[in-house]
Amino acid sequence: MKKLFVGVSLLATSLFVFTGCKEQKRTSLKPGKTNGATGIAYGDKKSDEGYKVSDFEGQPTGPNLVFIEGGRFTMGTVEEDITYKRDNLERTVTVASFYMDETEISNMDYLFYLYNIQQDSTREFYESALPDTTVWASSMSFNDQYVDYYLRYPGFRMYPVVGVSWIQANDYSNWRTKAVNNRLAEENSGGKKGGGLSFGKKKKNQGAEGLAAETPVEGSRPAIETGYVLPSYRLPTEAEWEYAAKAMIGTQYIDENQSNQRIYPWDGSSMRKDRGKNKGMMMANFKRGRGDYAGIAGKLNDENIITAEVYSFAPNDFGLYNMAGNVNEWVYDLYRPNSYQDFNDLNPIRRNDYQDDEKLYDKENFNSLIDNQQRVYKGGSWNDVAYWLSPGTRRYLDQDSSTATIGFRCAMISVGTPQ
């Protein structure tokens, strides 16, 4: 009986030691109270002494963002290459997890931005941020009402902002980063403001890497170590945008296999819903044919002759709205026809003309339209035929230009810990 008792005690002790060791396993969310490499205790959070370890429950999800779990996918067009550009051939790449706006940036979002920079910034910067409302004007089309009303009339509040250049979209992203982090700093420091929101005059002669406006700081930026500071809002890379649009997670089944490729952000080759009470209705807002923008009165199929509200139509399998149609969207990448050959296969991006110098294209002598000012846009719009709604198709435009068919949404990296 005594031996049995001793055996049970030893077993209990072993289990205690084993579970105790398991509980000591450190993670980014639970790093412990002492340094694992030295055993030295971390500093008291209430005092000014010692190395401080802030509480951390994972990266906060910024306003309007949706988590996109990364993975492998086949980047490139699956549509017939009717333009014969061969500028996005299929190749396998992997994209790390990130966040993306569930909707395009709306007129109300952009007007809020304009209001704030008008209060805190120079007149020059405010004027440089104004969308070009004349993108609606046409000598042979009566679109005067959109020139005057589309941006500011309350009925268009939740429609996607257009007339915004790639540069303006980047400036908005930079301001949004400061605005959100300033709010988080106030919430986490008892109402004390963090960094200021002022934007200065844009620097002249900046290259592609320095397009953001100067941002004088009032006070100090919250330390990254606090854990509540979000990474920067920015335009998505072309690979991120295409990955998020295809949303191949919806075709997944066991063993990392996928049941089908996708031409559009939904299954099938049709632009119409194939089942349910809305069977036969369009899945996106686009131009169906010459002169046909929506259908006939009394039965308008997509109900929108120009743009639609940003929450229109069903979201894709990542929960993102209008990743096909409504408006094209700016992405970060510089345009080159052979980027698919030069990309890294992990988090691909073309930041500049590395390995594909703009001199090779000889734009100065009118042998090409390509230089270091051309940025990619994707997704198709209310004024495009169905071909351009395929996520693999790509076009480009000067980064300082804007149209009535291009808007944008922001993205953000996911750092440190999984969702």
Image (cartoon, rainbow, N blue to C red):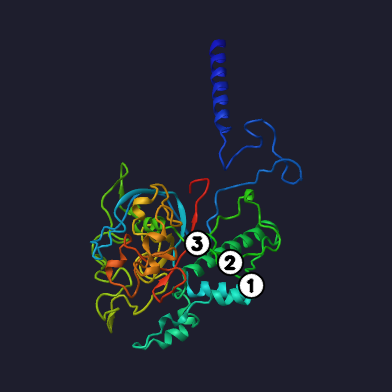
Residue 25, numbered circle: none
Provide the secondary structure element on which disc 2 rests.
Answer: loop
Residue 213, numbered circle: 2
Q: Tell me which numbered mark, 3 or 2, is placed earlier along the sequence.
A: 3
Q: Position of residue 47 (x, y in %)?
A: 76, 45
Toward which corner of the image does residue 31 lie, by quadrant?
top right
Residue 208, numbered circle: 3
Provide the secondary structure element on which disc 3 rests.
Answer: loop
> Quick one: 315 or 91, which is closer to the camera?
91
Is the Cβ of the residue at disc 1 closer than 8 Å to that at disc 2?
Answer: yes
Q: Tell me which numbered mark, 1 or 2, is placed earlier along the sequence.
A: 1
Amino acid type at mark 1: Ser
For the residues marked 3 and 2, what is the alpha-carbon distance in whole angstroms?
12 Å
For the residues marked 1 and 2, what is the alpha-carbon distance in whole angstroms?
10 Å
> Quick one: 354 or 226, which is closer to the camera?
354
Q: Residue at x 44, y 66 (%)?
A: 373
Q: Residue at x 54, y 74 (%)?
A: 129
Which residue in the structure is indicated by mark 1? 121
Q: Position of residue 337 (x, y in %)?
A: 34, 59
Q: Residue at x 65, y 52 (%)?
A: 223
